[in-house]
Amino acid sequence: MTAAAPPIAGRQPSAWRKLLRDQPLIPLSFLLVALVLMVWAVSPTARDAGWVGVIVRAAVPLAILAGCQTLTMLTGGIDLSVGFVASMAGFVTATFVNQPGGWPLGVAVALTAAVLVGLVNGISVGVFRVHPLIVTLGMGLVVLGFSNVWQLRMLQTGAGIPTELKTLGTGLWADIVPYSLIVFVPVALIIILGLRRSGYGRMLYALGDNPVAARLSGVRSWQVLLTLYVISAVLAAIAGLIYAGLNQTASVKLVAGELLPSVAAAVIGGTSILGGRGTFTGTIMGALILTVLSALLTILLLPEPVRQIVFGSIVVLVAAAYTRATTES
Amino acid sequence: MTVVRKWVGENSWISGLLGFLLLLSVFTFILNPYYQLTDVQGLFTSILPLALAAVAQTVCVIAGGIDLSISSQMALTSCVAAVLMAGRGEEFGVVAVIAVLALGLALGAVNGALVVVTKVPDIVVTLATSFVFAGMALLVTPRPAGGAAAWLKDAVVGKFFIDLFPKALVLLIVIVAVVWIPLSRSKIGLSLYAVGSNQLAAFRSGVSVARVKVIAYTITGFFGALAGLSLTASTGIGSPVPEPTYVLIAIAAVVLGGVSLAGGVGGVLGPIVAVLVLQLIRNDMTYLGVDPNLGTVAQGLILIGVLMLANYIQIRRARA
């Protein structure tokens, strides 16, 4: 940890601004606890450990998907192909269930496809310096198209979600602890420690903070970005497998609707889309907050449209609060 | 001829695009001997919503922004139009159209005001409002419903006097000529380009950056509403679920149409031609008997490929 910055002469930012800027996890935890208490206040049935397990289970794949956004946003990018990549992974795996080789082969094929998508994204962004927004948007279309082609080919063979994925996505150990944590905990640890401790993590922050300075300090930005977008695509595929298990179904658009929540979770968690600022722990909090909020709106019997409106408004509000807190004025 | 040569020299990118469109059209007629002028009319009817969405996107991109909520704006305005017009008289349709255009202006103004007031990046703000607008569309009607005045449906289908003029194309030209051309030549238009190319320089030259941004998004909202109306006109109903590919193709068309995402460069002609090119490629693949889903793949790959090529040339030039 770095030592506290010496006090700067002139106007000091207010206490809450400082808190939000330096320790966003504290206000985020308060928000999460407040939301949980609100759920418990209106719904007595939710006041048990099983409900917490269900919430965590739903937040796990969202957090992984939001991890893609966190990592790419750190460099000032974004990955809009994750929705279709994740759907593709679940769908391809499902089509292999009744094939020779079974679902493990399907997972291997899905991950290989994801790596290819990541390579194209990474080469365009890293080598040719095309805007990540455009590249990943275009690759999303490409993946959707190929998934549809694959769907027509495989229609005859029938598709089902393998039991192993269903257990992974929906299973609760002792009715409390989701099995998906088996995948999530290592993934999360690698991302968190990788960002904090590894040179690669530092290079991501450096590239987002000041790409020119990073390049002049000897960071080979194209290599970093290429690896980054491959990692992002693989993470999206892993999230897609868990989503397929959680929903017990697979389709080429299954996870497409989670694209916006994944960006929202990263933003709420304190990641700046301009790059250089953000943590994966914050993003996990963001995913949990969105999941609890969603549960609260369901308990209040608010229809889906209202849920969308509330989601959108909250994203703007939280993002505005961060912007106010982090811009020196 | 010198006028043409001068225009081509100044608009090399669009000229190339137009040349490509011409090639593609010839190719289409060769591929499908039964292709007739009525098919061309159908083509323009089908691309009208996309072309207007591309124009909408162009305006805020020129001013240095980006609007990811266009699909949702289209869904909301289309639903409101369809629900207002369902089971009412032809004259009421005029009132409905005016109301929907006003709604579009309001939606755009909300986007612009949020971008300016919160200082949150445009992508995040419009992503968030895309949720909000989509939710509002579902509140207007939970499932595809409503109707459209007969004159509105008639306005986008078929020919304008002779077969050579598809009505949808004429409508598009009229809209662009009446709304965009005077606007882009005015002081507001100039300040859109100024803010897009260099915000600080614009500010120091006395342009109110905040006001210009709000105006840019408001115009985007207006064209978004027109796109929504044309959806209602061509389908006869309003569908509350936004089609995400609209916003993807609108951005693709803007970029392929020679409008820089950095802002300050380009016009609306390029994106409109790009929409046509993207759609024709899809149609031609269908005529070739290729799986139409590969058309989506081709659209995405063309977008990425063209940009990679353009950037490669730029990087080479910068090094030389």
Image (tube, coloured by chain):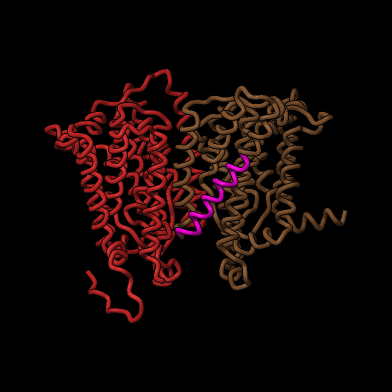
Chain colours: A red, B brown
Compared with B266, A9 (above or below) is below
Q: Considering the whole magenta stretch, tell me its main secondary structure.
A: helix
Q: Give percent across and percent down for residue A111.
A: 35, 39
**Considering the image in quadrants, where does the N terminus of chain A appear?**
bottom left
Residue A67 or residue A146, whichever sits in front: A67
Horizontal side of B53 relative to A217 (left or right) equals: right
* Residue located farthest toward the bottom when viewing the structure as drawn: A9
Q: Identify whether A98 is placed above or below B155.
A: above
Q: Does the magenta portion include B110?
A: yes
Looking at the image, which residue is at 75% across and 40% down? B22
Image quarter (top left, top right, bottom left or bottom right) of the C terminus of chain A: bottom left
Residue at position x 30%, y 29% from top? Answer: A103
Whether residue B155 appears in this view of the structure is yes
* Rendered location of residue A42, percent (x, y): 23, 36
Q: Which residues are magenta?
A: B100-118
Location of residue B101 in the rendering, given as x and y in whole percent from the top left corner: 63, 41
Instruction: Decide if residue B221 is on the left or right side of residue A274.
Output: right
- Quadrant assignment, res A233: top left
User: Residue A98, how many percent across, how many down?
Assistant: 32, 21
Q: Residue furthest right?
A: B1
